[in-house]
Amino acid sequence: MSISAVSALSLTDLETSTCQNLRFILTDFDDTLTWEGQLPVATLQALAQLEAEGVKVIPVTGGCAGWSDMIARALPVDGVITEGGACFIGKTSERHLTYAFWRDESAMRAEQARILAQVNPLLSQFPRLRLARDQAYRLTDVAIDYAQDVKPAAVEEKDACLAALLALGLNAKASSIHINVCSPGYDKFAMAQRVLTEVYGLSAQEQEAQVLYVGDAPNDESMFARFPLSVGVANIAEHLPMMRHRPRYQTTQPGGLGFAELTQVILTARQEP
């Protein structure tokens, strides 16, 4: 199957009324807001413009809680869903941070220790793979680096390791840089729906009309499957043939540059009568 056969719609097909009704943008972080390991100036500007417009941006990331704490404090976002849906880091009206875990925090920490005890021996079979450097700052899951600090990316080893983890009965998914291993029962969408419903009071119908999701990789499929308004940044193209659930729209620019491109389309549409 060719990539062109599964390409998404252009942003030019995104209707003006859809952009005008948006209240929330949920977005992956690595290679969706960032590009080549950096947060582009255009992306930061786009986040500030969306905040000024009243559109709440919530990153939904497999990144560690420590990194997400910094994102919530330093960037113009309304909160962060972190570690693949394990925890929502929100903000009070005084901009103090709050942590809401999917399950009891101590139970999730104990499960993380059990997962780590299974992952460590397995890694000896894959010399190029290693625990992510941010593992010490993770509260609930285990991350295996195959393309963040491992250069060139160890794609074949990643595929083999992922298969081995699944054979052990572990809940594992690959992002654009890591394999993330966590306890079952939640994912990005499950926590996103909980947050949108319980924190922001949105009904299922309101979520469909007022929430847009942006992503770049197969681990975003649960979001693409459930949010009718979904956008893939350009670098998702290489993954589309292997994906069952794909974004409805696609940017022409990669990563954070694509997010900035999408933002300008949204802002322009919201200025129309």
Image: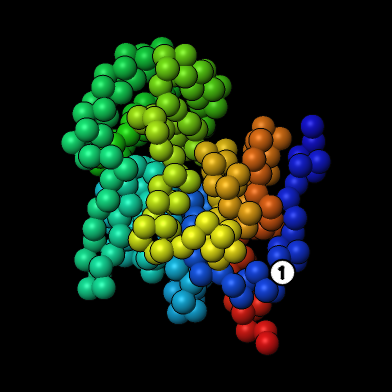
Q: Is residue 100 left or right of residue 259?
A: left
User: Residue shown at 51%/70% (left/top)?
Assistant: 23
User: Tag 1: residue type?
Assistant: Glu
Of residues 35 and 113, the one nearer the viewer is 113
Residue ID for mark 1: 15
Q: Give residue 67's position: percent from left, percent from top.
A: 31, 50
SS for tag 1? Answer: loop
Q: Is residue 158 left or right of residue 186?
A: right
| 235, above or below 55, in the image | above
User: Residue shown at 24%/58% (left/top)?
Assistant: 98
Please name the colour scheme applied to the rendered image: rainbow
Q: Is residue 168 visible?
A: yes
Q: Is residue 71 left or right of residue 105?
A: right
Q: Is residue 143 left or right of residue 117?
A: right
Q: Give residue 36's position: percent from left, percent from top.
A: 51, 50
Q: Give residue 196's position: percent from left, percent from top.
A: 43, 58
